[in-house]
Amino acid sequence: MGEVAVRGLAGTVTDVDHVLEDTFTDAVLVVHRGRVVLERYHGETRSDTPHLLMSMSKSVVGCVVANLVSWGVVHLDQPVTDHIPELAVSGYRGARIRDLLDMRSGIKFSEQYTDLDAEVRVIEEAMGWRPKTRIDLPQSMYAYLATLTQARDHGGVFEYRSCETDVLGWVCERAAGRRMADLIAELIWGPIGAEKDAEITCDGVGTAVHDGGMCSTTRDLARFGLMLLADGKVEDRVVVPSEWLNASWNVDADVLGAFAESASGPYLPGGWYRNQFWFLPRDTGPVLLCLGIYGQMLYVNPATATVAAKLSSWPDAQAPTMLEDTIRCFDAIGATLTRPAL
């Protein structure tokens, strides 16, 4: 793949090998029209190594929600408190399931990773992901979610907040009467034909960290992407209803406007966030992205029939140039392989 030219965000032309090296790649797998065209592992990572997906976990949880909606046990306009009455005293009072799926609730929650006092860092202490520094902090993730307050009206501008997925996961468990690990296994990971068991980290009382705790191999992550590319199917089995995915790809001006007005709008112009997926316009048409901090990415491009899974260890939680250069790298691979031979 070194011969594929990639024009980076800075305007410099490089190649796939250099992009992968410069973006701290642990593992990468690219599938074009059903054929593996690139698979590499670096450092201690191997084909059977489970890797933390970080916030790509959110997209898997969103697919669990899709199934529960199709069963009629969860409704998009339903108040969150119908399933979780414990949140009636929190800022989530009045929020709908749809608000959580699109991260448009009015909850007060900062996702500033460099601020140790931001709610995203405090909830990590409640989960046990970071050492506790606060004596009065609740001892579990769900208990902490019940302390969150409301900053503005629900249903407004998009704001990326991990707490939304944690509440969604709680809704799923209540609605289905099943643990999230079981729901993912039975509804998503088993049906995609995963080779290896996935894992999910838990807080001190055994609650799954829905927003970023899932771990899987690169190959199984790619299988998840191939299911999304195939309109939610694996062979003849429906894993995610096509209506759900169609509604994610095709959004109205309200969803586009909510994203454009957000802090993410200038960094991902023309993009949108729907049903726990990111979408971004490219030269060939929009691509679906599942993203996680420190360089985790699943890239799905229907126009070039390309799926790419990349697991990384960026030195910083967020790196806009590395993110854009990785997307451009996968754009270039798909475009090169799709281009007719002269």
Image (cartoon, grey):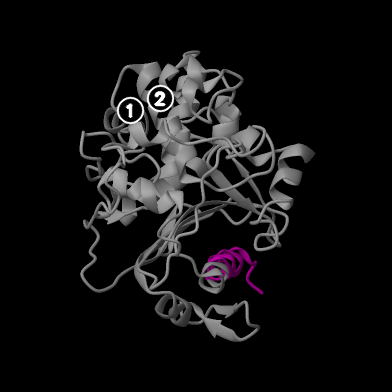
Which residue was labeled with disc 1?
183
Quadrant of residue 341 within the rendered picture? bottom right
Identified by mark 1, the residue type is Leu
In this rendering, is residue 78 above or below 328?
Answer: above
Task: Report the residue that reaches farthest toward the front.
Answer: 135
Position of 41 with respect to 97 (left or right) is left
Foreground residue among 219 and 12: 12
Within-10-Å neighbours for mark 2: few <14, some 14–19, many 20+: many
Indicate the secondary structure of the residue bearing disc 2: helix
Q: Residue at x 31, y 42 (%)?
A: 137
Q: Position of residue 319 (x, y in %)?
A: 50, 70
In this rendering, is residue 37 above or below 144?
Answer: below
In this rendering, is residue 303 above or below 19?
Answer: above
Q: Are marks 1 and 2 in contact (CB under 8 Å)?
A: yes
* SS assignment for the magenta stretch, majority: helix
Marker count (numbered): 2
Quadrant of residue 104 within the rendered picture? top right
| Residues at marks 1 and 2, CA–CA distance in whole angstroms | 8 Å
Foreground residue among 236 and 340: 236
For the C terminus, the image quarter is bottom right
Q: Position of residue 49 (x, y in %)?
A: 22, 58
Mark drawn on residue 319: none
Mark drawn on residue 172: 2
Magenta span of residues: 326-342
Q: Residue at x 42, y 30 (%)?
A: 146
Identified by mark 2, the residue type is Cys
Within-10-Å neighbours for mark 1: few <14, some 14–19, many 20+: many
Q: Residue at x 23, y 64 (%)?
A: 46
Q: Residue at x 32, y 17 (%)?
A: 177
Comparing labels 1 and 2, the label whose residue is closer to the camera: 2
Q: Position of residue 44 (x, y in %)?
A: 20, 69
Residue 234 seen? no
